[in-house]
Amino acid sequence: MGARAAARTPRVRLTPAAEEMVRRLTRQHGPVMFHQSGGCCDGSAPMCYPRGEFRVGAADVLLGRVAGDTPFWMSADQYRYWQHTFLTVDLVAGRGGGFSLEAPEGVRFLLRSRLLTEDELEHVTAEPPLPTGADVPG
């Protein structure tokens, strides 16, 4: 067995309600993924898609995996603004304007953020860059 890669500083997590919705969506649609683009159509909300139905760009950044193995991607432009933050994906009542899988359920995913602590920022700065769409096979 080879040496195990060092764990990265967590950058994103789900609230229990959001995690339960991801489990439900996975049962209905198969593996899913998140993408945070910052574009139109409720761009401040993370969108949840069936994995493989959204093409990740080469510059998109993989912030981490949530709810087990669900990738959370962010566009490079957004990442430049959010790189010093820790993100929490929550689930709230109401419909967003996007095409995210949870919309028919009458709920939507919502990002909450906080600045990284000095300790977290020190660790993040010492770690290798996060993987991008160019690094991770589709």
Image: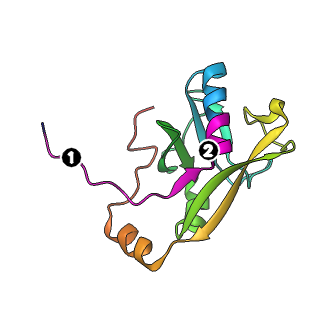
Could you tell me which secondary element the residue under label 1 belongs to? loop
Between 1 and 61, the one nearer to me in the picture: 1
Q: CA distance from mark 1 to mark 2?
A: 28 Å
The image shows residue 95, relative to residue 8, as above or below, that is above
Could you tell me which secondary element the residue under label 2 belongs to? strand
Disc 1 or 2, which lies upstream in sequence?
1
The label shown at residue 42 is none
The label shown at residue 35 is 2
The image shows residue 115, relative to residue 108, as above or below, that is below
Q: Residues within 10 Å of mark 1 (few under 14, many from 20)?
A: few
Which residue sits at x=44%, y=49%? Answer: 132
Q: Position of residue 115 (x, y in %)?
A: 57, 73
Q: Dividing the picture into quarters, in which one does residue 137 lie?
A: top left
Which residue sits at x=64%, y=36%? Answer: 20
Magenta-colored span:
2-21
Determine which residue is flagged by label 1. 4
Give the residue type at disc 2: His
Is 46 inside the magenta-drawn segment?
no
Q: Position of residue 122 (x, y in %)?
A: 38, 75
Q: The N terminus lies in which quarter of the figure?
A: top left
Is 14 inside the magenta-drawn segment?
yes
Between 33 and 54, the one nearer to me in the picture: 33
Which residue sits at x=13%, y=41%? Answer: 2
Which residue sits at x=62%, y=21%? Answer: 27
Give the residue type at disc 1: Arg
